[in-house]
Structures are given as C-alpha cells and as structure tokens.
Image (cartoon, rainbow, N blue to C red):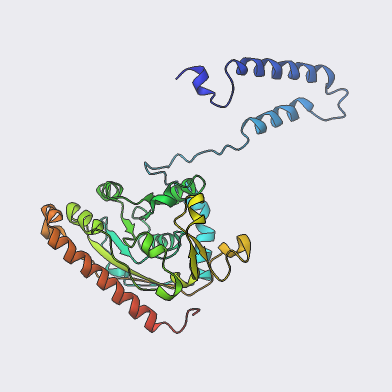
C-alpha cells in the first residue's frame, strides 16, 4: 500500500502541506505564549492535547480480542450491565432445561423467532453464557437485510451476531462455537400479533443438514414473551423497501411515539431448552438424504411448537 493509499480521507499531496501548517502554527504559539507571559497556562501543552483529540475524532481503539466474525469481547463486557438489566429486570427471564445442554461440545440451538431486532438471540446467548461461563460465547444468526445495514451491522457483529447462512454456521461449529439459529427467518420476524406463537415453516431444512454434516447436537429452544415485546398490529411493506427493510412494523407504540416506540415492552420471558437431538450416529452422508432431512426438520419444528404452546399455557400472564 502506498502513502497515498494509507490516507484515504485526504487529497493527494495534502498530508505534507498539513504537517507544514501545523509545524508553523506550533512555532508561532511557542513564540507568542511563553511560560513568562502566559499567566501560568501551558499553551503549548494545551495545543498538543487539542491536536491529538482532533486527529483521533470519531475513532475508537479496537479490542485486541476480536474474532474472525467481528465479535469484540471488550464490547460485550461493556454491554453486560444493560444486557443484565434487560435480562433480570426488564424481561425477568426464567430459564429451564439448560442443564441438559451438552458440555464441551458446540451445539446448534434452534429457536422460534419474533421481531425485527435480535433481542431473542441476545437473551439466549446470555442464558447459555450464565450456565456455561467457560465455554465460547454462542453466536446468533441474523437475517441478510439486518446483517448488511450500514449502522446496525457493526454493532450486531461486535455483540455476537453473524449473517445467517449454512457456510457461516458450519464454520462456527467446526471451531467449537455454538450457534443459535432461527429457521423461520423473515416469516417469523414478520408475524403479526394475531399469528403470535405459530411457528412457521423451517425453510429447506438447512439447520438439520448442518447438524448432520458436522455431527452437532440439535437443541430445540422455545422463547415465550418475546412476541409481545414488540406486538406488530400490521405491516407497511411498500415504503419499507426504500430503507432496505422487509417491512415497517406498526405497533401500539411505533411510530406513534417516535424513537421511544422502538423500546420493547417489559413482558415476562421464559426460555426453555429441550432435550438435545444427537446426530453423530447418522453420519455426515445423512445430510444428503432429502427424506430424512425433511422428516427431522418437521419433527424439530413440531417439537418447538409444542414447547411454545406449553410455555404460553402455563404462564400466569404476559407480564408475570
């Protein structure tokens, strides 16, 4: 890379001119503001401090512990207080069945999905992190449109979100990192309130193929409470395309309350982990068996649907 390539924000030849101007200004300040007539103010030190601040304006030191998918351990540590607040106080998450989650092995967690924002992925990852703090943090998959938004993508990546595709899931599992998948995809995120907790079709069985190919355990997960946190009354799809969104949700608070309408409601959440489904005995060649993949996919979807229905039936109310 040439010197011009290293300064992408400045026109060619401008760097030497800028340095000369700064040197001349430094000399002029040194001549005019000496300690004897500066009333005790060290103007040169003040100038150097301001110069360093403006030179790094808008920049942030990157953590040394950033993995190949962009997850930043420092960012997660900084976010932990408000994630704990959401988990413990706002949604008051209760967890069951996590004791059966395999230890020392990367697993593929498959959950029902709701909402445009990946709150459910963050909360499932937090639940797993609390149960197995020594294990690598589980990564949650996000839809293409969300993973490519200019401002959302860096934040999501730093906190463990990964673009949803089979290649990424397999790469994570091969490196002993568990994956949280939402195979309903956009159909799950787009459910309106009257369709809540109806688990949609699981695409073409990508989660089952991935688990079979790598011999990873499939762990069904049911999340109850998330679908009322942002209850979608109806969707606006035509105008949403201009913003690169699949739809704009209309909820009881958005867009009526403006930015405040984005704040999720303090519903009561429960996360239930089902018994792991082992795939090692079937062998990697089973991933090419279309009938087997279809049957396992439907059984997995049906199991999650049953777990969701039990969770909805047994909760006292949406709020407690």
Q: Position of residue 22 (x, y in %)?
A: 70, 20
Q: Position of residue 92 (x, y in %)?
A: 48, 72
Residue drawn at x 47%, y 75% is 268
Residue drawn at x 22%, y 68% is 298
Residue drawn at x 82%, y 30% is 41
Residue drawn at x 25%, y 62% is 102
Question: Residue 303 appears in which quarter of the rendering?
Answer: bottom left
Give the residue furthest to the front. Answer: 238
Query: How many numbered discs?
Result: 0
Question: Residue 97 appears in which quarter of the rendering?
Answer: bottom left
Quadrant assignment for the N terminus:
top left
Question: Residue 46 appears in which quarter of the rendering?
Answer: top right
Q: Nearer the viewer, residue 299 or 315?
A: 299
Q: Is residue 210 among what the camera can see? A: yes
Position of 42 with respect to 197 (left or right) is: right
Q: Position of residue 245 (x, y in %)?
A: 47, 54
Q: Nearer the viewer, residue 161 or 151?
A: 151
Q: Position of residue 180 (x, y in %)?
A: 34, 58
Is 97 placed above or below 287 here? below
Q: Nearer the viewer, residue 197 or 265?
A: 197
Position of 285 with respect to 268 (left or right) is: left
Q: Nearer the viewer, residue 250 or 320?
A: 250
Is 17 placed above or below 114 here? above
Position of 79 with respect to 308 (left or right) is: right
Q: Is residue 278 among what the camera can see? A: no
């Amino acid at each position: 890379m040439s010197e011009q390539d290293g300064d992408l924000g400045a026109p060619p030849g401008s760097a030497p001119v800028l340095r000369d101007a700064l040197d001349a200004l430094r000399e002029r300040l040194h001549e005019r503001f000496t300690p004897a007539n500066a009333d005790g103010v060290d103007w040169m030190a003040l100038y150097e401090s301001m110069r360093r601040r403006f030179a790094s304006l808008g920049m942030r030191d990157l953590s040394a512990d950033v993995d190949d998918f962009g997850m930043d351990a420092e960012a997660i540590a900084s976010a932990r207080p408000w994630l704990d607040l959401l988990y413990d106080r706002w949604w008051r998450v209760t967890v069951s069945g996590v004791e059966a989650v395999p230890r020392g092995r990367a697993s593929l967690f498959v959950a029902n999905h709701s909402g445009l924002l990946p709150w459910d992925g963050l909360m499932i990852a937090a639940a797993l992190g609390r149960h197995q703090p020594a294990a690598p943090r589980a990564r949650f998959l996000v839809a293409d449109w969300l993973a490519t938004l200019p401002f959302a993508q860096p934040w999501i990546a730093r906190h463990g979100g990964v673009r949803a595709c089979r290649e990424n899931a397999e790469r994570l599992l091969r490196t002993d990192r568990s994956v949280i998948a939402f195979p309903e995809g956009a159909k799950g995120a787009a459910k309106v309130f009257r369709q809540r907790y109806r688990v949609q079709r699981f695409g073409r069985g990508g989660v089952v193929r991935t688990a079979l190919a790598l011999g990873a355990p499939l762990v069904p997960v049911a999340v109850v409470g998330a679908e009322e946190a942002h209850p979608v009354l109806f969707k606006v799809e035509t105008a949403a395309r201009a913003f690169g969104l699949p739809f704009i949700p209309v909820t009881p608070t958005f867009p009526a309350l403006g930015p405040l309408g984005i704040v999720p409601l303090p519903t009561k959440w429960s996360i239930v982990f089902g018994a792991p489904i082992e795939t090692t005995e079937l062998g990697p060649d089973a991933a090419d068996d279309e009938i087997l993949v279809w049957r396992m996919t439907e059984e997995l979807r049906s199991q999650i649907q049953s777990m969701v229905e039990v969770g909805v039936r047994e909760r006292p109310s949406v709020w407690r």
